[in-house]
Image (spheres, helix red, strand yellow):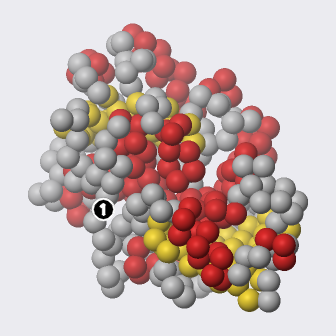
Amino acid sequence: MAHRVQVYILGGSGYGGGELLRLLSLHPQVESVRAVSRKHVGEPFWKTHPNLCRVVDGAFEAEPDWGAFAEAEHPVMFSAMPHFELAQQLAALEQVWAKYGLTERLTLIDLSGDFRLDSAEVFERAYGKPHPYPRALGSFVYGLPEWQKEKIKGAKRIASPGCFATAIQLALLPLAGLKNLGFIAVSAATGSSGSGATPGETTHHPTRANDFRAYKVLSHQHEAEITRLLDAEKTSGYSLAFVPHSAPLVRGIFATVQLHPPAALALNTQALKKLYEEFYRDAPFVRLVEDTPRVAAVVGSNFCDIAVHEKYGNVVIMAALDNLVKGMAGQAVQNMSIAQGFEKTEGLSAAGIYPG
Ligand SMILES: NC(=O)c1ccc[n+]([C@@H]2O[C@H](COP(=O)([O-])OP(=O)(O)OC[C@H]3O[C@@H](n4cnc5c(N)ncnc54)[C@H](OP(=O)(O)O)[C@@H]3O)[C@@H](O)[C@H]2O)c1
């Protein structure tokens, strides 16, 4: 019988926090979940996350009850705070964990971009500001289970990938390591929940609902995550251009990757299908589909659907996922399960809702 974990969520009132509360309530190895919010202290979770009414009990706390958490046999902490927050708080948190004897036992899973990159220079180029705690860079395992599941097993610090990065990396992963891949054009659209729960100019419904536009053209921070994976796999002779789009959706990422690999690789549609099927044979949340993936088929689920095509040597790979699930909270829960040695699909195998 596998052990059970005791969970705290930092940033529990955001979209990531809400999805973590929902998904962890379905996980048989989760004994308890508590959550922190600065703005909703004392309020029941369901006041902020109405879908959790009568499903998840509990109220937001101003800060973790460290004394009680220190009693936990298998403590797990998710950080679902905005970029830079965990990095700013980590040195102080490490002191608290040392005081309460949590340092060796705690599993920390971060949903933000703070620890996905190992280099302070690359981080500053991607995020436009110096890293607040560069000493801790490199101490987190990058949590893309389809890439490096073995490293996630037993890991105490995991940086869950970004939502765009997850879709694009899963589209490219079977091709990683190939030589002379050439120009890789990536176009990917996201729904408004990708920007979090706080309304902003780019997420406000009237400015988005009937619009479709690009943003952060060739300068999105997730590009650094994608190229790091390709470089780590020794992919050569490639150049990647990523254009993100804002789509009139609430949830969902749809990524289209196009490239013209060398003819010698013989990547026709049939060869691509075989390559992707074999590569993802043991990946329970990647589904190969015909024609096109659909956002509506993955919303609410931890699945990433992928389709591959080739004509005249032009290769197209498309991937769709729910940015709040496989692109964030679901993947973080998947990482928790792998790190703790649980069945990797536990709590996550439900289908999405259709129509969405
Ligand atoms: N949305 C996505 O699709 C997506 C996908 C992948 C990764 N991510 C990343 O995951 C993280 C969470 O995203 P989200 O969409 O859930 O964001 P969100 O909806 O804006 O939620 C952020 C949470 O952090 C808390 N918070 C804000 N500032 C804080 C501070 N200074 N100290 C402590 N808590 C603070 C907020 O709660 P209170 O104000 O109540 O404390 C809120 O609960 C972000 O780093 C984001 O980049 C998001």
Identify whether 355 is placed above or below 350. below
Residue 340 spot, x, y in % from top left? 35, 35
Name which residue lies at 15% across and 56% down.
55
The count of marks equals: 1
Name which residue lies at 11% across and 57% down.
54
Whether residue 32 is visible to the viewer of this picture, yes or no, is no
Name which residue lies at 77% across and 60% down.
178
Identify whether 96 is placed above or below 306. above
Q: Callout 1, which amino acid?
A: Ser
The secondary element bearing badge 1 is classed as loop
Pick the front one: 85 or 288: 288
Identify whether 289 is placed above or below 303. below
Pick the front one: 83 or 117: 117
Name which residue lies at 78% across and 55% down.
235
Q: Quadrant of the C terminus?
A: bottom left
Q: Residues within 10 Å of mark 1 (few under 14, many from 20)?
A: few
Residue 193 spot, x, y in % from top left? 47, 66
Residue 212 spot, x, y in % from top left? 62, 83
Residue designated by label 1: 349
Pick the front one: 96 or 254: 254
